[in-house]
Amino acid sequence: MNIIVCIKQVPNTTDVRIDPVTNTLIRDGVESVINPFDAYAIEEAVRIKERCGGKVTAITMGPPQAENALKEAIGLGCDEGVLVSDRKFAGSDTWATSYTLACAIEKLETYDVILCGKQASDGDTAQVGPGISTHLDIPQVTYVKKISEINEKSAKVERMTEEGYDVVETPLPCLFTVVKEINTPRMPSLKGMMRAKSAKIIKWTAADLEADPAALGLDGSPTRVVKIFTPEPRKGGEMISGSPAEVAKELAELLKGEVV
Amino acid sequence: MDYLLSESQVMIRDLARKIAQEKIKPVAAHYDESEEFAWPVMKILAESDLFGVYLPEQYGGLGGGILDMCLVTEELSRACGGIALGYAGTGLGTLPILLHGSEEQKKKYLPAIASGKRLAAFCITEAEAGSDAGSIKTTARKEGNKYILNGTKQWITNAGEAEIYTVIALTDKAKGVRGASAFIVEKGTKGMEFGKKEKKMGIRASATREVIFTDCEVPAENLISREGMGFIVAMKTLDTSRPGVAAQAVGIAQGALDCALDYSRTRVQFGQPISSFQAIQHMLADMGTQIEAARALAYSVARMVDSGAKSVSKESAMAKLFASDVAMKVAVDAVQIMGGYGYMRDYPAEKFMRDAKITQIYEGTNQIQRNVVAANMIKETLKK
């Protein structure tokens, strides 16, 4: 079985800072890590390989240093890494990003399963995974919390919903985005890390992908980020003190005054 | 301090640190309280290949040495000295095979140890043979193509959990220590049983039991080296493993300092963090300095072992005694800095203090280490 896992490098911080002028993330001085949700996708990909045999290819679009994320993925059990990197991809929104990744996936020989984290911890859009399946014209199941059955032809999975979960059967190839409930990612192994150190990462540029140049990067992005801002923290409420009867009375008066 | 570790040693240390901080630290208090053996953690260490760092590649290891093992032991001990001992105790039980085993024995046992599928244990101590290891009473009588073992080993780390035991027993009682021999005994061998699990002051996640041999039949090919070599095998094993105890002590001390340092920066008294008081600062400075000195000595001796030095008895005794005395002192000071909070079991400082104590006692008390150091020093002056 050929398994593809799409990963992204994100800043290792929960306190993401935004440049107020350019509206982009400030990455200086912030260590990059694999998007935490993608770590579950990597683990699930490796588990499918362990169950069914086959090969796991990790793929990422990003700057040259994203190669480190692919090596880390190999250390965690992936077999090979593909870095899609070109200045022409700069400014891609989720549509252009998913188009680019879809082109790279089509360039790979065959694929049965594509796994993505449910969303990236920096942009939080949750759009790239579904976008890839749309470009590839294959089924998608999002928010997968369990892959109950899987073989060369089909899979049965549990998809998390707000109230519970759906059981979904799908033919393969299919794209799954996974939630953190799906597994506990393993620790890297030394032998995997040694293999990763010497592993050769496949590098593709826009020209290698034979993609439509107009669909790449900023030009290929139908959306524009107009502004990113940190919402004002909520102001503290008003405290009313006194006996329960007094408090209730005052609260009622206040509510009347506000015409709730 | 930069110890000029190799690229792979940095990788080993960083991975051990990651596992210790993410997978051991959160469960250390639980295992200390429950005294269970931390099998889930052992599984993680196994899958991460850490059990094989010091074993040769042809036996499934990563080809490193004692320094590599020390780096792992130190990082694990920084989170929990008891859980770390499941790892370090396996190293101790493995060394007789690695250092003196035959090619067949290495091929048979080391790959399972390197992959972490089987833990190991070293059995020398008996009720009446502690510091005086020469007075062991367990016997191994040869009968045809097997040895019959009889006797009781006491306070054996990993006993009951490990599957491979290296055991020192007398093949010739009349010759005393020159009549001792070393054997490999597999768990499940008929006539081998385990006593009750001991209740300890510290390192409570580590399993300590008696190992009881009653007409236990061991195949003759499980004899390590030759008959009569048992004491030499044991002494060489302990000389090689002592930097590991030093590393465990350094890790415990560092873990205690980590707590005290964090606490001192957040604990406010008299309107300021207590880390702003010189009394606290000087304690922290001494703790940090002592730990670095202990680490430097431990790593130096580990490197000396890895270089193939002929005798490391004096140096490995120095590393063990110095680092373990530092661990005890630093852990006591960490509790002191944290005051009442340090004394409470809700905080990890007191556990480091309990865990530190054993490092001054096992694998040779620090008094015995001083005997070894002094005896070697005096011997060296006689040679001049």
Image (cartoon, rainbow, N blue to C red):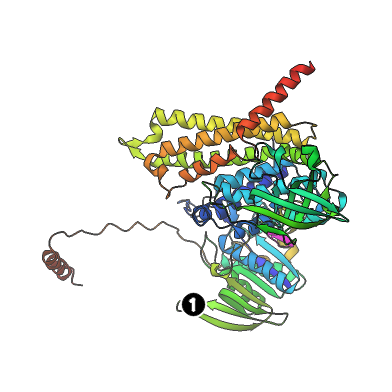
Q: In front: B381, or A205?
A: B381
Q: Image quadrant of residue A238? A: bottom left
**In this view, B272 is above or below A106:** above
Quadrant of the snapshot with the N terminus of chain A: bottom right
Image position, residue B310 (x, y; %): 80, 32
Give, as a single range, the part of the protein colored magenta.
A72-84
Location of residue A111 in the rendering, given as x and y in whole percent from the top left corner: 73, 73
**To which quarter of the image does residue B297 belong?**
top right
Q: Nearer the viewer, residue B293 or B146?
A: B146
Label 1 environment density (alpha carbons within 10 Å; few <14, some 14–19, many ≥20): few
Residue that lies at the very extreme toward the top in this rendered image: B384
Q: Is residue B359 visible?
A: yes
Quadrant placement of the C terminus of chain A: bottom left
Residue at 70% across, 30% down: B315
Residue placed under numbered mark 1 in the picture: A161
Give the vertical position of B199 relative to A145 (above or below).
above
Q: Residue at x 42, y 36 (%)?
A: B336
- Residue A115, quarter of the rendered image: bottom right
A176 to B94, vertically: above or below = below
Task: Indicate whether residue A81 is drawn in magenta.
Answer: yes
Q: Which is nearer the eye, B312 or B187?
A: B187
Q: Position of residue B136 (x, y in %)?
A: 71, 42
Residue for point 61% across, 35% down: B365
Q: Position of residue A221 (x, y in %)?
A: 57, 66
Task: Confirm whether the magenta stretch covers residue B341.
Answer: no
- Chain where mark 1 sits: A
Query: What is the secondary structure assignment of the residue under circle 1?
Result: loop
Amino acid at dot 1: Thr
Residue nearer the viewer, A25 or A143: A143
Residue B112 appears in the rendering: no
Classify residue A44 as left or right of residue A197: left
